Amino acid sequence: MFDVIELNNYEMQPFYDECKLHGFVNNYSYKSMRFDFVKERVGNYWGLVSDRLVAVAGCHKFPEVSDNAFRIQFRGCELPGTDIKKSLSRSHFNSSTFRELIPYQIQWCERHGSDELYLTTNLDNKNHRAMQLIAKQGFLTLYSQQILFEVEQSIWRFNIDKYISERKKIGIYTVQPPPLISS
């Protein structure tokens, strides 16, 4: 089972080294993960630990969309072959960051007065195709496609109610049950 941690004071270098080895350019250093940017924007990062840190994702305020918006799954990354859930999922719940860390991001945003959540994908990325597929299931709605931080991206509005409803149907893979899911 995974342990969910906040990454505030966690020793990240071994994770950065593995990300660099796999070519994950957004996750191989403190600077590339933009920790300072996330903190400036009332954000946070969480990680999944088994024998080591294997996945991360963050959230932050997203004024490019609206004054109340938050961006979730920021710099989301999981190391290959580390997920403990091995079955396929057409709803993207085979992604450990999507399955295990989004509940913490929803809770964080709610604590900061927002239920207006978005995630972004680069148009030239395999995650973009995955988001198109789960949008067809009602988890996301395409908000816009635009240049964001000098990269062409899709911005997807996240359906919290649909996510929670579907997430409650699958198992718990963490030491502590995810917020909003086990109640």
Image: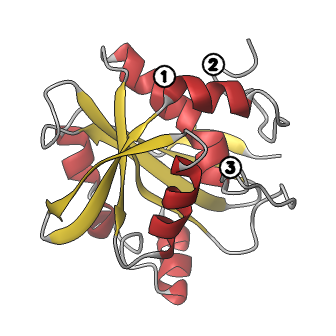
Relative to 109, does residue 10 appear above or below in the rendering?
Answer: below
Q: Residue 152 at x, y = what percent?
A: 21, 70
For image coordinates 12% across by 70% down, the residue present is 150
Q: Nearer the viewer, residue 95 or 65?
A: 65
Lateral position of residue 40 relative to residue 108, left or right: left
Lateral position of residue 68 relative to residue 43, left or right: left
Relative to 11, does residue 118 appear above or below in the rendering?
Answer: above
Residue 180 figure quarter:
top right
Mark closest to the chain's N terminus, 2 or 1: 1
| Residue highlighted by disc 3 | 91
Mark closest to the chain's N terminus, 3 or 2: 3
* Amino acid of disc 1: Gln
Check the picture and name the quadrant holding the C terminus. Answer: top right
Q: Secondary structure at mark 2?
A: loop
* Amino acid of disc 3: Ser
Could you tell me how far apart the alpha carbons at marks 2 and 1 are, in whole angstroms? 8 Å
Q: Residue 67 at x, y = what percent?
A: 13, 27
For image coordinates 19% across by 38% down, the residue present is 41
Give neighbour class at mark 1: few <14, some 14-19, many 20+ (Cα, 10 Å). Answer: some
| Residue highlighted by disc 2 | 180
Q: Are marks 2 and 1 in contact (CB under 8 Å)?
A: yes
Q: Are marks 3 and 2 in contact (CB under 8 Å)?
A: no
| Residue highlighted by disc 1 | 107
* Amino acid of disc 2: Leu
